């Protein structure tokens, strides 16, 4: 891996916890790897570690006072914020997490944080009960929803004497997380799907019978999520249209999430964005039929049998396949036997560019698992056969294929 830290401007925010001493090692390791580390300390951090230590290790001026403007040409906290590639808060106390969540800017670090547009990573360190306090949990949730990434504390003996979760992650690990993140961001910035708009659908649709009952399927959403992440990692602008799933969609501020519950909702969400889309990946399991009537109130039990009349939903892929112009269309065929035959038929019927076929009856393939076994076909036949691999790897190979076919460039 290329050194992704080289030449990067990192603001390291150090707040007042006992783990502040580890920030010295962190500063040293980041600096040794070629990063330009600009340390901002809170007043409490200075109770634990000196400015001089961090200045000597980073070879940069250390900031702590908003009003100590040493350069008349620039306002320090704005200048630092504007030029940062990444902000890392380590250790982050419950106090800074609370201030960040609520937009408080009463010192150099918090003022800079409000002005910054670069990604922010937070490595909390505190007593185990503080870490589990509902206020801290809710503040971290607010920040996570805003796209702030957490480097979770480790478990072990805490300075307060308790054993539990709250110990600042080791500097080596923090450096590795930052390095991986920057490497991925660099590849996103120059990836083969750069400039492409990719829309991905994921999960299983819900077709309402009444307010408390519905028809759905076993789709977990994992494959679609993996495709969205892979497309993003290769530089695409990604919209993820999500039906019912087993887990939350990727929390990446660069992936737009659109909720669509039923086949009709999904049709509207996808067709509304269709003209703008370059690549559509329909990993969702869309219901083929929905109840003809969806009762407004709960259906009461009566009689020994109940007949539900179902009507066909719109086949989203088939409809869009007919109006395709520049778009590259990828469908999925989850089958239980005869996958190749059915997949090839769907490819033609829906006017697709690629179809990903899998036999969900085979162990390790299909719904709910983290792995898949797929064969990818185009109009000419088999393009790629992937043995049992992770859904992330299937997604990566699929998106590389799409990149190659939409740009004409060799892999
Ligand atoms: N699909 C769709 N709209 C639907 C049904 C399916 O867009 N109403 C898409 C799925 O997202 C998937 C592909 O079509 O990418 C194949 O789905 P599948 O249910 O296997 O295809 P069907 O044509 O419904 O065939 P089958 O008879 O096997 O259900």
Image (tube, grey):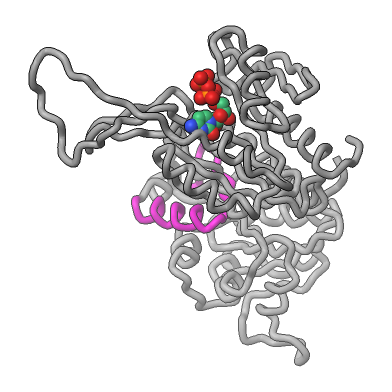
**Residue 71 drawn at (x, y percent):** 77, 87
Q: Is residue 208 magenta?
A: no
In the image, farthest residue toward the left: 302
Closer to the camera in the image, 317 or 388: 317
**Residue 59 drawn at (x, y percent):** 83, 67
- Image quarter for residue 390? top right
**Residue 184 drawn at (x, y percent):** 75, 46
Closer to the camera in the image, 196 or 173: 196
Residue 26 visible to an observer of this rendering: yes
Left or right, residue 303 beside residue 117: left
Quadrant in the picture for the C terminus: top right
Quadrant in the picture for the N terminus: top right
Q: Report the magenta residues as a range.
A: 134-159
For image coordinates 39% across by 54% down, the residue present is: 138
Query: Total number of numbered labels?
Result: 0
Left or right, residue 144 beside residue 223: left
For image coordinates 72% across by 14% down, the residue present is: 387
Q: Is residue 140 magenta?
A: yes
In the image, farthest residue toward the right: 410
Left or right, residue 41 beside residue 27: left
**Residue 283 drawn at (x, y percent):** 57, 32
For image coordinates 82% across by 37% down, the residue present is: 405
For image coordinates 44% across by 48% down, the residue present is: 127
Residue 53 visible to an observer of this rendering: no
- Image quarter for residue 375? top right
Left or right, residue 409 beside residue 223: right
């Amino acid at each position: 891996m290329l050194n992704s830290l080289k030449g990067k401007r990192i603001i390291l925010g150090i707040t007042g916890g006992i783990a502040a001493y580890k920030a010295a090692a962190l500063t040293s390791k980041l600096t040794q790897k070629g990063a330009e580390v600009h340390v901002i300390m809170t007043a409490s951090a200075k109770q634990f570690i000196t400015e001089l230590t961090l200045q000597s290790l980073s070879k940069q001026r250390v900031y702590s006072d908003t009003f100590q403007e040493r350069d008349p040409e620039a306002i320090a906290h704005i200048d630092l914020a504007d030029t940062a590639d990444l902000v890392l808060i380590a250790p982050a106390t419950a106090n800074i997490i609370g201030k960040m969540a609520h937009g408080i800017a009463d010192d150099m670090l918090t003022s800079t944080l409000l002005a910054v547009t670069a990604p922010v990573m937070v490595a909390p360190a505190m007593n185990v009960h503080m870490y589990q306090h509902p206020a801290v949990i809710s503040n971290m949730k607010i920040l996570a929803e805003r796209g702030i990434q957490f480097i979770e504390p480790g478990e072990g003996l805490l300075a307060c004497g308790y054993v539990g979760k709250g110990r600042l992650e080791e500097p080596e690990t923090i450096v590795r997380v930052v390095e991986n993140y920057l490497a991925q961001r660099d590849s996103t910035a120059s990836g083969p799907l750069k400039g492409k708009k990719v829309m991905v659908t994921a999960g299983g649709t819900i077709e309402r019978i009444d307010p408390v009952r519905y028809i759905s399927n076993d789709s977990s959403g994992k494959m679609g999520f993996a495709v969205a992440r892979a497309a993003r990692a290769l530089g695409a602008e990604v919209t993820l249209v999500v039906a019912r799933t087993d887990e939350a969609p990727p929390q990446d501020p660069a992936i737009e999430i659109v909720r669509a519950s039923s086949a009709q909702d999904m049709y509207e969400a996808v067709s509304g964005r269709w003209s703008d889309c370059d690549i559509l990946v329909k990993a969702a399991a869309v219901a083929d039929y929905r109840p003809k009537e969806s009762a407004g109130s709960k259906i009461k039990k009566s009689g020994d049998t109940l007949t539900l009349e179902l009507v066909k939903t719109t086949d989203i892929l088939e409809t869009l396949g007919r109006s395709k112009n520049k778009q590259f269309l990828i469908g999925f065929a989850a089958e239980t036997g005869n996958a190749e035959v059915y997949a090839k038929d769907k490819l033609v019927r829906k006017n697709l560019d690629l179809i990903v076929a899998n036999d969900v009856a085979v162990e390790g393939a299909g719904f709910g698992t983290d792995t898949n076994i797929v064969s990818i076909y185009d109009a000419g036949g088999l393009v790629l056969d992937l043995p049992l691999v992770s859904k992330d790897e299937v997604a990566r190979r699929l998106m590389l294929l799409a990149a190659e076919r939409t740009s004409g460039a060799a892999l």
